[in-house]
Structures are given as C-alpha cells and as structure tokens.
Image: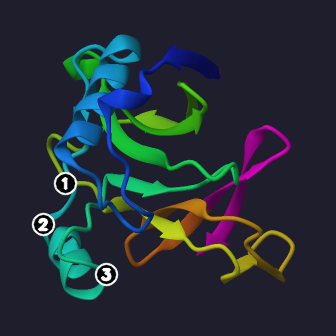
Amino acid sequence: MVISVFLSLVSYVLLPGSNMQASTQVENVIRRELNKKFPGWKFVNIHKAIHKRLREHISKDALPNLIQEDFDGNGQSDFAVYITHGRRSKEKDIIVALLKTGELFQLHILNSVVSTSEQYPSEHYLMVAKKGSEGLDHETHKKFKYARASIMEIIDGRGSISYVYEKGKFRQIITGD
C-alpha cells in the first residue's frame, strides 16, 4: 500500500544514515505524517534489554523502533518505524517504511500483526542492513549482498526478516531463523 503525502523540504533537517541520527524536527515530521494515516498510533513497546543492547553495541542514539537510511537508492534519507495502531482489543503492530521522493513521502506497510506489546514488551525491533553487507536467504539457502540499505525486522534470538526495495516495492526475505 503506497500513499503519497506532501511534505515541505524546509520543515526538516536530515542527518546521514545509521540507526537514527535524526533531529527533533525530523521526528515531528514523521509523527505528523503517521498521524494522518494512523491516528492515535504509538511506538511499539519494546523490551528494555533490547534498548540497552542497541545503545551499547550500535550507538547511544539507536532506537529499536525508528531507523533512517536511503532504502530506495534515490540519495534521499528514508525512515522505517515500528508502531502500534488500533483499538485496544484490535491493536496491530505495524512496520511502516516512509520513502522520501522529492517533496513527498510514500508510506509502505511492510508487516502487520496482532499486537501483544501492551501486555508483553515486544522482542521484535528494527535495524539497518547496510548496502554491500552479506545476507542469507533461508528459503533458497543462498548468500546474497544487499544492493542497497534495507530494513531488517529482528526477532530477538529467533530470526530476522529483511525488507528489500526492488522495482518500486519491498520484497520480504527470511534472513535468519
């Protein structure tokens, strides 16, 4: 699902990729755009041990539910967020990619599952698979190199799914089990 949303270039400042080196202005833009499509959304409640591990091993600014990188290869910084949306008994945990194209963001829903993160902190989180890094497709049992930065959904200690942008859409690859 792709939704184009107008966004003024002067309303934010983007810093180079990595696991979230974005200014408060960028966070406000993301919040505003998500509010249009997912009113009442919030970031998924992720286990505190994951927050701690990312800050110790990735960056003090690393967030498990918000990443920034150029996922579509157009030279502009894109984002992926892991959010919860919906009414209490019907909440969904959703991974959304926000791809920057000129003055627009395109929203892509990558994954959506019934939420349990209110009762139990999620052990799923987001990371960037860097361009040129190696992955293993567990369905084909073949190694591959990421042609561009990609979104990884990590299931702590159990597996991972990569969302690779190709030919105008995201393709899901099981990259860990």
Q: Taking 120 as reference, is 86 above or below it?
A: above
Q: Quadrant of the N terminus?
A: top right
Per the image, the residue denoted by label 3 is: 58
Q: Quadrant of the C terminus?
A: bottom right
Q: Nearer the viewer, residue 91 or 100?
A: 100
Is residue 164 shown in magenta?
Answer: yes
Q: Main secondary structure of the magenta part?
A: strand
Query: In the rendered structure, which disc, 3 or 1, sits on the residue that comes first in sequence?
Result: 3
Direction from residue 86 to residue 78 in the image, left or right: right
Tell me if residue 133 can be seen: yes
Q: Residues within 10 Å of mark 1 (few under 14, many from 20)?
A: few
Q: Amino acid at mark 1?
A: Pro
Which label sits on residue 121? 1
Which label sits on residue 48? 2
Q: Residues within 10 Å of mark 3 (few under 14, many from 20)?
A: some
Q: Secondary structure at mark 1?
A: loop
Foreground: disc 3 or disc 1:
3
Q: Are marks 2 and 1 in contact (CB under 8 Å)?
A: yes
Question: In the rendering, at what x and y percent does residue 149 appear?
Answer: 62, 65
Foreground: disc 3 or disc 2:
3
